[in-house]
Amino acid sequence: MNISTEEIRAHIDTPLFRMISQTADELQMECYLIGGYVRDFFLFRPSNDIDVVAIGKGTVLATAIARKLGKEAHLTLFKNFGTAQIKYKEYEIEFVGARKESYRSDSRKPIVEDGTLEDDQRRRDFTINAMAFCLNSERFGELLDPFGGMQDLEDLIIRTPLDPDITFSDDPLRMMRAVRFATQLGFDIYPDSFDAIDRNKERISIVSMERITEEMNKIILSPKPSVGFILLEKTGLLEILFPELTALKGVETKEGVGHKDNFYHTLSVLDNIARETDDLWLRWSALLHDIAKPVTKRWDPKLGWTFHNHNFIGAKMIPHLFRRMKLPQNEKMKYVQKLVSLHMRPMQLVEDEVTDSAVRRLLFDAGDDIDHLMTLCEADITSKNPVKVRRFVSNFKILRRKLREIEEKDRVRNFQPPVDGNEIMTLFGLPECREVGVLKTAIKDAILDGIIPNEHDDAYRYMLVLAEEMGLKPVKEG
Ligand code: ATP
């Protein structure tokens, strides 16, 4: 990449950077832009996250800058770490003093001493994240790249600045970061660094699950997440972190009949859905949609390979998985469970006849998540047979049209039965009991099956007839 100091200087010649520059000069402190901002400049990815390293006290520089920026700047000092953050307009600026780090074997937390710029660059995770631009006025825009980050950017390579065994063993989170950057940027991990991940993979156990999941979410949110999961699998990290996913791998053949490799199928579904949506939880649903296939796999001499109920069992596995991965135990989890449990329904529907009643039931069960469910199902079509794919796609079009028509007509998407339990209990003088449940279900089924319209009076009359057959008498005329 042929970018001159003039071009760098022109790019960072903004009032904010000039002000940081001037303040550092006044304090007679060397100061550099470093890390992601510099990397992203060369990748033409504009960024508002700015990391500044000072040779001296980063907190002193930050305090002087915040004072000059005035009321619009919000300064936070992290005294214990000797770091500071300024939030200013759309910018988030982190300040650190250059430091030298050494590690103990049982912790990601280093022992820290003051250091030179190069000491600080050496403690960075990858060469492409270790480049710096000088901000002091005399050398404004000078690139400092002692580890060949620029060359690695050109070669699309993720490589550690030091011996990778040391970099990864010191802070094993960097192994996840290597995979994450490779996935986000479409880079390769340098063979030496890759092999070192394999050798150091067990050390991932000293990293908190929250940090690991943060990186995994970034992999899932990448343009082609399969790249990351294949790397995690190849390095052996996936087996440690997510054995349920590696269990999907492989093909078994019996009597000449094989099933698809559910690991690679899952990754294709994830890539497919990544082209349609940036919704993290919809992407998680794609990753987990077949998670119970290994535990439900059976050989049936008549049917071949079956994965009976893998959707329901998969939905049941999710709370445990989410707890282990420190993912939220809230409505996001319930949403993923719902999509996993329903993921086969639209496909079953288009394979059978698309009756109004089946469409109503699907709308009722999926509620507001119906569009996401349809997106998941379409992403699930990974057949290599173009005739089959064309048929599915065209059937899905018909189903989508039917879903729209029936929703407009019957409004069942979020429907509450028009006669509720309270009304039934008051009418017949009943406590909460089985009979009330039977009547409520019968009303719901009759509406979904199109026997009665979704209206109070029709439902009420229908319920009275049923109740009479059950021997129930109103305590007052309704
Ligand atoms: P992104 O914003 O996409 O996460 P980034 O490179 O800005 O990318 P940050 O996590 O904000 O990532 O880190 C900023 C810089 O700090 C990195 O570019 C890198 O130089 C350094 N860094 C962050 N985490 C580590 C780590 N675990 N080990 C070594 N250096 C790190």
Image (spheres, rainbow, N blue to C red):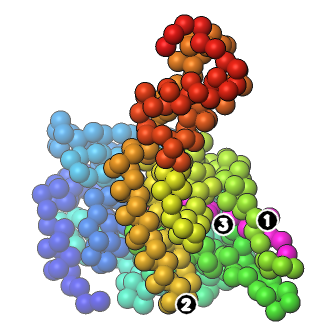
- Residue 385, labelled with which disc? 2
Answer whether labels 2 and 1 touch (C-beta < 8 Å).
no
Q: Which residue is mark 3?
A: 290
Q: Which residue is mark 1?
A: 296
Give the residue type that dot 2 points to. Answer: Asn
Q: Earlier in the sequence, mark 2 or mark 3?
A: 3
Q: Residue at image x 26%, y 52%? A: 91
Task: Tell me which label, 2 or 1, sits earlier in the chain.
Answer: 1
Q: How many C-alpha atoms fall within 10 Å of the one at disc 1: few (<14), some, or many (≥20)?
A: some
| Rendering coords of residue 21 (x, y %) | 20, 59
| Circle 2 SS class | loop
The 10 Å Cα crowd at callout 2, few under 14, some 14 to 19, many 20 or more, is few
Q: CA distance from mark 3 to mark 1?
A: 10 Å
- x and y percentages locating residue 370 in the rendered image: 46, 54
Residue 25 shown in magenta: no
Counting from the top left corner in percent of width and height, residue 326 is at 62, 48
